[in-house]
Image: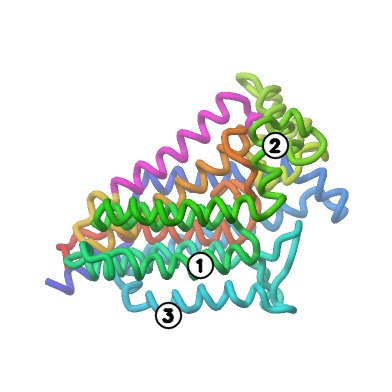
Amino acid sequence: MSGAVARAGSGPTYDVPLLFAVLFLVGMGIVMVYSASSAVALEKFGSGAFFLKRQVIFALLGIVILVLYSHIPFRYYRSLTYPLLLMALGLLVAVQISGLGVGAGGAQRWLRLGPITFQPAEVARLVLVIYLAYSLSKKQETLGRFSVGLLPHMIVLALFGILLIMQPDFGSVVIFTALTWLLMFVGGVPLRHLLGALLVLSPVVYFVMINAAYRLRRLISFLDPWQHPADEGYQMIHSLMAFGSGGLWGAGIGKGYQKLFYLPEPHTDFIFAVIGEELGFWGVLLLLGLFATVLWRGLRIACGCQDHFGMLLATGITFALALQVSINMGVCLGLLPTKGLTLPFISYGGTSLLLNMAAVGILMNIGAYHGQRT
């Protein structure tokens, strides 16, 4: 019986709607990265296709990774949980080491290992999901105890949170905290413990927000960006202008105006605004439909998995994508304070794209699993 289960979880079965939506998003991302970055790339690197070429390479490598991870039985990650957790924490510590950590825009969030530069927070997010899925599934009979269901998971979250705040990367802290709370809720931790944790964390979050002057300025400018058009409100204003000028059908691919040195980070954090300007309402609706398909299939896979670890792992991956999409779009639309988070599968960047493709590959494998609860 166990052999049949293993074979069922490692076969080359693909969720066609999920695969189509992800590949369409990646293709759309390549087009929009080129459109959003060509002017910046031409000025900085002398070639308008600089970011395009790199994104194509990332996309091709991402497809290979998706296929590879879709063939790795998801249950193998149980035995790798703690080595992966130590690795993720080690990478976040290494960011603070001189000579390894790479800074940009006042933050030190990247790690350089030889010719490779990547963002450890992206790795840590997937590792956190694996850890929570493993720990909650292993302890499901005793999650009602505070010392078992809540405390160890909050300690791990605190370790990640401290290292992320040191970068600083408050946006990732918010995602990590929301992921931990949601997975503990789904996993079966008593609601009274979760609500108590929220009450304890609220003063900490408030202190962290007001303790940094730039976060306080961002919050104030978020409430009325038009009162701060030259500094903290600048990005949000130009993002809203991009959406406003897009109309129903948009200006056309490559014909946007805000990306021409007005809108900061047009090919990364604010690529959604470029899509709104160049593809208009219908382009944004298409993008939302594709993301909705990914999230719908992820939840279907989670609900259909009879293995508790697989269910939690699929739920965590889906929640992580949903949170990142929601925060990025919320920032671009002026619904949330400005935060440096990319749009999954769309924004330029190798770390985010490759990790998200790996996560989708894991989802594919969970979806191919038809065994019994173990």
Query: Residue 227 location in percent, x, y?
Result: 76, 29
Q: Which residue is mark 3?
A: 83
Residue pointed to by mark 1: 160
- Comparing marks 3 and 1, which lies closer to the viewer? 1
Segment tinted magenta in the rendering: 275-300
CB of mark 2 within 8 Å of CB of mark 3?
no
Q: Earlier in the sequence, mark 1 or mark 2?
A: 1
Question: Along the horizontal axis of the image, is 348 left or right of 254?
Answer: left
Mark identifier at residue 64: none
Q: Please tell me whether residue 117 is drawn above or below residue 35 in the rendered image.
A: below
**Which is nearer the eye, 189 or 48?**
189
Label 3: state its secondary structure: helix
Q: Position of residue 162 (x, y in %)?
A: 55, 67
Identify the residue position indicated by label 2 in the image.
221
Marks 3,1: beta carbons within 8 A: no
What amino acid is at disc 3? Pro
Give coordinates of residue 277: x percent, y percent.
68, 29
In three-dimensional space, the C-alpha distance between marks 2 and 3, rounded to whole angstroms, equals 42 Å
Q: Earlier in the sequence, mark 3 or mark 1?
A: 3
Q: Residue drawn at (60%, 32%), measured in percent from left and top?
A: 333
Q: Is residue 139 left or right of residue 363?
A: left
Secondary structure under tag 1 reads helix
Amino acid type at circle 2 is: Ser
Chief SS of the magenta region: helix
Q: Tell me, yes or no, whether the highlighted magenta stretch contains residue 293.
A: yes
Residue occupying image coordinates x 74% and y 28%: 226
- Comparing 300 with 125, the one in front is 125
SS state under label 2: helix
Residue 3, horizontal then vertical, whole percent: 18, 74
Image quadrant holding the N terminus, namely bottom left
